[in-house]
Amino acid sequence: MSENKMDRRSFLGTSAKIGVVGMVGGGALLASCAKKDKGPVYIPLRQPDEYYIPELPDKAIDGKPLKAGVIGCGGRGSGAIMNLLDAADGITVTALGDTFADRLNSLKDKLKEQRNQVVPDENCFVGFDAYKKVIDSGVDMVVVATPPVFRPTHFQYATEKGVHSFLEKPIAVDAKGYRLIMATAKQAQAKGLSVVCGTQRHHQRPYVEAFKKIQEGMIGEITGGNVYWNQGMLWYRERQKGWSDMEWMIRDWVNWKWLSGDHIVEQHVHNIDVFNWMFGYKHPIKATAFGSRQRRITGDQYDFFSVDFEYENGIHLHSMCRQIDGCSNNVSEEVHGTKGYWKSADDAIYDLQGNKIWEFDYDAMRAEFKQEDPYVLEHVDWVNHIRKGTVHDEASECGMSSLCGVMGREAAYTGQTIEWDTISASDLDYLPAKLEMGKMDMKSYTVAKPGTGK
């Protein structure tokens, strides 16, 4: 087996300051370059009671013991359950499910060796229906970290059974999955469930503090932005002897568009979501894009995308993502306004003349908090909602941002301008009608070619 060693979360840590984050709201976690006695007066975009700010202590509150299950025991599922155990006491992992026994057993051994948690054999399930068995085993909460195409169905079943969900991003790769996510999110709210998604910047202290400043009006009315995820090639898996078409594709899932949604959805959703979040989750009305495949070794995806998202009132977001070795890298976001702009790469806000008027204070954060990992803090927030009995919905937001990625992808694949109303109502459905190990019609998995070629 050949595998590229680049780990996207390691890359994120070095490129976007993921490793140096913490809580907002407990102290003076910012430093302003404006006068501290009589600073400028800003007109807020929204009032404080109109947007959500998470409570992010170092650890979740104590409360009733919770039984957790994991659906998808690969790298992200393994990482997420360890994050959950770091986030709260009183969590017991009682059930595991995966398509492949080797992935399940790897996590099972890791839990025993590193956390002294033994998952009973009778609660370890393998196969395409493993998610049902995990949820039916009596868990209170479930980590859903399967390939993205499966997440809408798994979320729906967990919600039907009254189980709280952590959904790794993205949570939809097509229009049908998006609509299922949005409908299930409403059902989860009605049942009083807490749902948190893997868009961890919502629990990353510099981002949350910047969000507050933007809502308070520090950059004025939002006029547009730029979002980037440009990095080297991700991992891939060469086909091994004895693997069927289906097994190979699932083991190599991050390179196949039906499983991952392509990297504009699977990875770049983070950055698109940041702009949508800062903008108050007003979805774009249309997208025009281009992209291409130049270097990829397996799968049927593109290597890069460039998208112009147009929102109401002529506001534009430029979205750029690339996965090619040997090119310049950039993982960041910018939001522009009538009075200034925010750059996530600097954790700072500037006025229109380029003067820094605010920046996040890391020293103050570290003096007050110990936990700096947003991948842990998102689980702190999740457990706090569960133990307090408060409803929380991140699925609707992440679902919208996931469909933005789908819209940009389809605009690039087809060469056409794609409208939100068209893509959200389309019959686009990537999930195969029959899920079983065996042969696939591999000729149908081809790289998209926009235009006529004439």
Image (cartoon, rainbow, N blue to C red):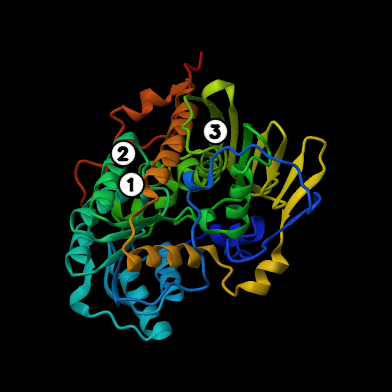
Q: Residue 149 carries which label?
A: 1
Residue at the spot of label 3: 292
In the displayed orientation, state which residue is furthest to the front: 38
- Taking the image as shown, residue 259 lies to the left or right of residue 354, namely left
Residue at the spot of label 2: 430
Indicate which disc, 1 or 2, sits on the residue closer to the N terminus.
1
- Taking the image as shown, residue 345 lies to the left or right of residue 305, namely right
Residue 211, percent from left and from top: 59, 48
Q: Distance between the residues labelled 2 and 3?
A: 20 Å
Depth check: 130 or 166 in front? 166
- The answer to whether 174 is drawn above or below residue 107 in the figure is above
Depth check: 127 or 346 in front? 346
- The answer to whether 34 is drawn above or below residue 28 in the figure is above
- The answer to whether 365 is drawn above or below residue 62 in the figure is above
- Taking the image as shown, residue 240 lies to the left or right of residue 329, namely left
Instruction: Identify which amino acid the numbered label 3 is placed on.
Output: Ser
10 Å neighbourhood of mark 1: few (<14), some, or many (≥20)?
A: many
